[in-house]
Image (cartoon, rainbow, N blue to C red):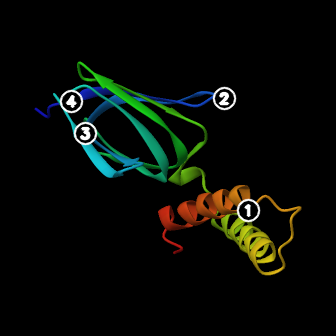
Amino acid sequence: MAKIFHVEIVSPQRLVYSGEAQMVDLPGTLGPFQVLVNHAPIVSQLETGILRIQEGEGAERTFATSGGFVELNRNRMTVVVEAIEESTEIDPARAERSRERALERVRRARQEMDHQIDVARADAALARATNRLRLVGRL
């Protein structure tokens, strides 16, 4: 029998996931890391990246997240995210259009010194779109 722990992923809009996992890969701000059963208590900030859950039965679910926090204590993990999409929810064509728009905004802001464009916001949009495309195998 697999060793498992409880995982919940919540966003401001909804409970995204609640279930048992054998392993969770997370995009930490200091680098990606993995959590298994009986991991030491941890609180960590997350960045834009891919979150992967290997469920108790062995099935795998993957999500594109744009940052947040994770807390793990006594084999109960809570992931609080700003935004998250499961790989099955991502429309690759829409993600590609988002990436193209973000690339254009970043280019205009840097090359033309367009001060009406928030460069940090454009960079974040580009990172989110690129992450979604990477998750669905388009990059």
Type of the residue with mark 3: Val
The local crowd at label 3, few if under 14, some if 14 to 19, many if 20 or more residues have their Cα within 10 Å, is: some
Give the mark nearest the N terminus, 1 or 2.
Answer: 2
- Residue occupied by mark 1: 119
Label 3, label 4: how far apart the Cα atoms are: 11 Å
Above or below for 84 versus 135: above
Cβ atoms at labels 3 and 2 below 8 Å apart: no
| Circle 2 residues within 10 Å: few <14, some 14–19, many ≥20 | few
Side (left or right) of 29 relative to 113: left
Q: Amino acid at mark 4?
A: Ile
Please identify, in this view, whether the residue under mark 2 or under mark 4 is nearer the observer: 2
Tell which circle, 3 or 4, labels the residue nearer the N-terminal end: 4
Q: CA distance from mark 3 to mark 1?
A: 34 Å
Q: Secondary structure at mark 4?
A: loop
Q: CA distance from mark 3 to mark 2?
A: 25 Å
Q: Name the residue furthest top.
A: 74
- Which residue is under mark 4? 4
- In the picture, measured across the screen, residue 82 lies left or right of residue 19, that is right
Three-letter amino acid code at disc 1? Val
Please provide percent x and percent y for residue 111: 78, 81
Pick whichever of labels 3 and 1 is earlier in the sequence: 3
Q: Does 107 appear above or below 45?
A: below
User: Mark 2 = which residue?
Assistant: 13
Mark 3 and mark 2 lie on one chain; the one further toward the N terminus is 2
Q: Is residue 123 left or right of residue 58?
A: right
